Image (spheres, coloured by chain):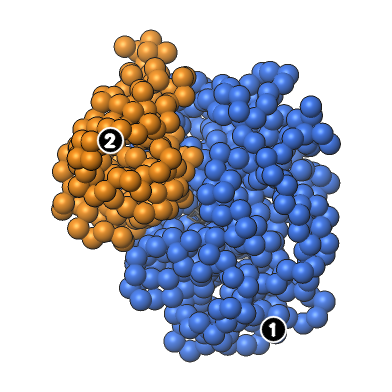
Chain colours: A orange, B blue
Amino acid sequence: MSYKIRGRVWKYGDNINTDIISPGQYMSQPVEKQAEHAMEAIDPEFSKKVRPGDILVAGHNFGSGSSRETAQMVLKHHEIGAIIANSFARIFYRNSINVGLPVVDMKDTSVILEGDEMEVDLLEGKIINHTQGTEYQGTKLPEHLIEMVQLGGLEPYLAKKLKFS
Amino acid sequence: MGMTMSEKILAKAAGHSNVKAGDIVWVKADIAMMHDLLGPWLIDGGFRRLGGKLFDKEKVVVVSDHCTPPATVQQADILKFTRDWARDQGLPYYYEFEGPCHQVIVEHGHVRPGRLILGTDSHTCMAGGLGAFATGIGSTEMIGVLLTGETWMKVPETIKVIWDGELPHGVYAKDIVLKTIKDIGHAGATYQTIEFSGSAIKSLSMDERLVLSNMAVEAGAKTGLIEPDETVIEFLRSKGVDDGLETVRSDEDASYAQILHYNASELEPQVACPHEVDNVHPISAVEGKAVDQVYLGSCTNGRISDLRVAAEILKGKKIAKNIRCLVVPASQHIWMEANKEGILEILTEAGCIVNMPSCGACGGFTSGVIGAGEVVMSSSNRNFRGRMGSSEGEVYLGSPAAVAATAIEGKITDPRKYLLQGVR
Ligand code: SF4
């Protein structure tokens, strides 16, 4: 996981749950098929319009619901750069760090607008809005996760711990 | 300062004498549970790259339930992969076609008071109904657990939810948990434990307790706990378990993030309306809403007592014309019990379809998904947009009794008018 990310914003509301991000009915299909249906319940154009590096900005409780990592897989398939939200659901937050999908929470995402050009420094929790010329402070990752993020997620972290690399 | 149940169980799992909410600890799992859809076929690659050696075969349980019976070739492939994986790993505990994993691991005695249970499914928290600290994790995190038996956890604060008094006739654990989720909010307990206690909880059967712990995650909680007592011990003994039955309880002077107090005798039947589980209203507010399908099943409310109450309501009656009523017992064991008691016959005569125990329609995978514009009244636990099929469909959640009464009228119906006084 690289820890500085820059991209343009797609804006969503509260409670974007895992059934929205990756609908259950497509979960047994290959990830590229699932990715076509990502977010379609609230944004049918999503899979056509997102470009690599884009940043999703949302309100409270992003990723609630299931423990399915297909939610991360489809977003990674679209090469989403980062997700910024007021808050994340617990399992989603852990899974994202484990698979190297950058997530940052900050107090009030309502100041960020769709289309803004943003930069996120994951380790510092710093968020720069280049369009508006402003800067926000997000929550810094807990100390014990920084090494995991620097290594690129749980698998490389375990590889190091278990001496497979 | 005393400790909560969560603190005690995590202290033990971390090998410490004392931990407190907020501490980050490395914990050892007693059981690592995976199901077909989020299990072996997703983790195998990473697992092999890291050596592919299980920390302890006896502690790994795999249940195929989401792709059973397979509706597509892909699902059949996943199922086969899972079955072969379990065999190749020499797992002593692999179950398939038996029902949703959370019910299956309870029935087979894998869940015991004080255990730490990690599963690749958000409703793993159901095991908290027996006093286990149980929580859902992702598939990648499971790779680490399978290899090392460990993961890191932040010790959660606890919200104590006390329900005293006696539940009125026609009101159930489902109504308790829906009302609780409404008040806490769907993210109100994020990173916290919900501990249910009080005289109303104490008098609930094992079946009913599991409804509460199952749905704790719908308030965002890490787990839902109930202090284990004689009801739990007797249940486990009836399943042939006779060790690991030490109970665990919160100390009197444990500290809580919040304490909520309710009087159960004032509760009415509740319904969660689309598309959030905390969008809860008394049933009177939504009575008369026409439905296309009724679903009685899932790990939340497909147990024998749920089927009994539905049979009580549907006996000698017919379900409404032009609707489907799908009944899915939560396990093969429950299916057989219901069969012996004549319940399946009563339900079938009323016009219900009894499907095999599986996640099927509950998660929108197989056997009864809904189309655009269709409305379901369901006894399951989640009503998110697209949960049971089309994102243009609507899911209402209620107790099995409310579901059965709705089947008769084809519209959301207060179950109390169909229940004989004194039958619970
Ligand atoms: S029955 Fe429904 S809630 Fe339970 S494990 Fe299966 S899909 Fe999940």
**Tag on residue B418?**
1
What residue is shown at x 51% (from left), y 73% (from top)?
B377
Please name the amino acid that badge 1 sits on: Tyr
Please name whichever residue, B187 or A148, is drawn nearer the observer in this view of the structure. B187
* Mark 2 element type: strand
* Residue B122: image location, x then y, percent: 50, 46
* Residue B264: image location, x then y, percent: 77, 63
Check the image and report above or below for B120 versus B161: above
**Tag on residue B97?**
none
> Comparing marks 2 and 1, which lies closer to the viewer?
2
Quarter where residue A26 is shown: bottom left
Quarter where residue A41 is shown: bottom left
- Asked if one can make out residue A21 in the rendered structure from this viewpoint, the answer is yes
* Tag 2 residue: A134
* Residue B126: image location, x then y, percent: 61, 48
Label 2 and label 1 in one chain: no
